[in-house]
Image: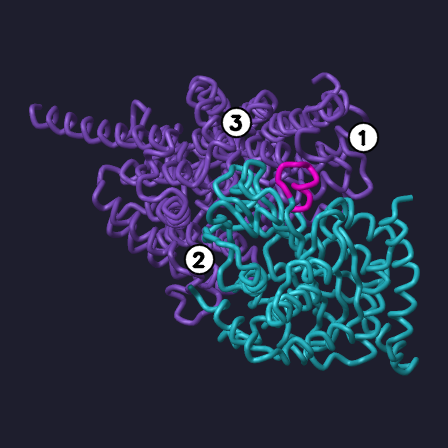
Chain colours: A purple, B cyan
Amino acid sequence: MIEGLRLIFIWPTPLALIGGVVIGLLVGILPGIGGIGTLALMLPFVYKMSPPLAIAFLLGMHAVCNTSGGLTSVLFAIPGESANAATMLDGFPMAKKGQAAKACSIVLTASMVGGIVGALVLAISIPVMRAVIKAFGPPEFLMMVTMGISFVGVLSGGKPFLGIACGGLGILISLIGDDPVTGTIRYTFGWIYLWDGLQLVPLTVGLFAIGELLEYGIERTSISHERESRFKMRWDQVWEGISFVFRRIELTIRCALIGMFIGAVPGIGGVVASFVSYGHAKQTSRLPEEFGHGNPEGVLAPEAANNAKEGGALIPTIGFGIPGSAAMAIILAAFMILGIKPGPEMLSAQGLPTTFAIVWTVALANVLGAFIALSWVPLMARVTNLRPGILVPLVFVLAILGVSSRGYPEDILMALLFGVVGYVMRMMDLPRAPVILGFVLGRLFEINLHLTLQIYGPSFLLKRPIAFVIMLIIVFTIFWEIRSRLKERRTEGEA
Amino acid sequence: MEKSKIFFFLFIVFTLPIIIAARPIPDKAKIESARAFFKDKSIEFVVPYAPGGGYDGKARLMQRFLEKYLPRVKVLVKNMPGGGSMVATNQVYVARPNGLTIAILSGVGIVANQIAETPVVKYDATKFTYLGRIDTEKRVLIAGLNSKVKDLDTLLKPTGKVRQALTGPGSGSYAVTQIVLSSLGFPREDILGYQSSKEAQMAVIRGETDIHLSGTEGAELARRKEVRPIVLLTASPIEGLEKVPNLFSKELMEKLKLSDDTIKRISFARDLMSIGYILAAPPKLPPERSWLLEEAIQKTLHDREFVELGRKSGIIPLVEPLSGEEVLLTVKRLLSVSPEIKSDIKKLMKPL
């Protein structure tokens, strides 16, 4: 372990780590420059580096992409990375209440703690995670996704039936594109752009950011409705945010563990991790009714999960040589160029220092990333007070940049289309978050349902005890939710 | 020095002059004017898939070397995913033929889609300006360590149905591999819907399916003893798996006593997979510009550092260059396929 740390501190490795972290933060904060694309872009630079130098640079950069991506979710409802989509559900309402600096500070601190937890668990779990990863197949994924879908009611802000309807709309949208089992092309109307389905970022930016943008333009307001703080640098809010995360350290760690675990399972993805953590935070919160209206726990949960999942995604990459995500595929190629062979060798006496260098890099990058970005927060938070004349074009440009990362004009068209849908939904007071959740989980549900039924048949729950236990948890959670709502109504009635 | 390394060395030393000498050289003045045209310009290197995959890795590996062999030219990789590589293929076909757009394309994809007359095909594969081939497609049939499939014999005479993990129905790659596996005639149950090869590999490791016909990543898993390699489908050797039987070898085909018709189908699949990963530009590219581009590409593919990086990273385990002319000839030959195979491909490329 100490040898791993020593490798990271051999000059000029710390410099590479700082360089990687700064690039990662900038990439995360600028919508439109994807973290994966930047990793691929940087790959040629590591060919001639020593393994610790390259690890520090690439992993340092990758570990903090989601950290700063959460900042644009808070400030403009534009997620820097798709995994930051859940952050805006409460982060943006906090910005509207004039608490942008506090929300940003929570984003950064929760990301740091999440990243450290992810790295620590990565360090201690590699030997056992091989067995755990092997124990999770399509039936377990199906139940995990079902658990996520059961949060639709949780995300509906007191309107469970409307929430379920909006979640259903999201699932329907997720079915656009090729059928994963038969290859049939569905609902594309002959448009090849839709073959791969709709993309998450145009959908999210449309439903939230452009919907909000239309409101600023029409109502001529700034994001923050708090007028007095206009020219203040809110360092007080920064401290408030930091201390909030440490006061809720138990929740932060729980969400980090959820993120780490989902990250470790190839094929589920970081977006699910952040939404499941969000749902978990709401269910265990003392003030669940404040979720969606600017509850800081709703910012803390997805961000802790986001950064922890990177530690998780390294487990199958290091343990089996099977990358947990597209970003990990690039990192795996870099490892192999550098002569780092994934698999059981990474746990041998020869491979352990490198393994621990990886762990230390992830942990240190998260600490460094949070400290660097925290110094930007008070200044950045001031954009929420900008006049609509400046704000609308600024957010519009950022939104367009955010959706055009793939270089397809059709993505912009889709964002504008969903912008109108988002505005109408807002006017009609329909919950928008379940649409995103349904969209993210719909396809995963379909794929894993098909695989489960093909492999295990309809009685799969009897053959897979872990899936059965997850199913029991889902039933219990739904039952508990209904019971507490009925109880609330009864109390209100009596009052 | 290992035998395979000696082979690499000789291959690199001898094939470059042969490929370059075999190409007709345009007028010297025209080449100079083409060189002047490229100076201080950017070439868009189109990749038909998202970052993080095999195509993207190959393009990015080539990028720096192309800049080395095309002085004062910037090469920018552009990912254009969608439609199972058809979005990029169609776009490159209609791009301006000025030499500033090149692409890495799937040989199997462009030929199989044209044979199947897929409605999205907006190109004629014989009209592209081909600039060369990087390597061939290789497949390894892998089995789980606890699977009933232990070797080729237990695959062909299993104790029950063999469960196969499959990805991408309707794609060219799917069609080719299904043609080969169907011709072996063992009892099979296809489990469809895995989203990528890595998920199908995990299914084999977990033991929920018996086999998966994987790309070269499967070879890496086999070398690390995470899975068992059963049979290879490759026209060229795979490092570390030299002792695994190869279905494309004449000896094995004879040993299995395959019918003439089956051999024809397997040979077609082998030829199709041999086109592999190709480099192309839009049709009607002026010959002097294509000459310059092809020269830079061939020099890249024969650069020892490039070959070594490709091998070490696993992105291009074995560089197998072909000239643009040779790629075009292979494409033309494959498109004039027999009606029986054409009908097979059409059936397999249709949604299930």
Q: Residues within 10 Å of mark 1 (few under 14, many from 20)?
A: few
**How many numbered discs sit on the rendered protein?**
3
Q: Nearer the viewer, residue B99 or A415?
A: B99
Sequence-wise, the earlier of marks 3 and 1 is 1
**Quadrant housing the C terminus of chain B:** bottom left
Q: Which mark is residue A343?
A: none
Sequence-wise, the earlier of marks 1 and 2 is 1
Q: Are the residues flagged by discs 3 and 1 in contact, CB closer than 8 Å?
A: no
Q: Which mark is residue A198?
A: 2
Instruction: Reply above or below: A37 against B95.
Output: above
Sequence-wise, the earlier of marks 3 and 2 is 3
Describe the element under mark 1 as helix, strand or loop.
loop
Q: CA distance from mark 3 to mark 1?
A: 27 Å
x then y, percent, for residue A372: 62, 30
- Which stretch is magenta? B218-228
Instruction: Identify the residue position indicated by label 1 in the image.
Output: A12
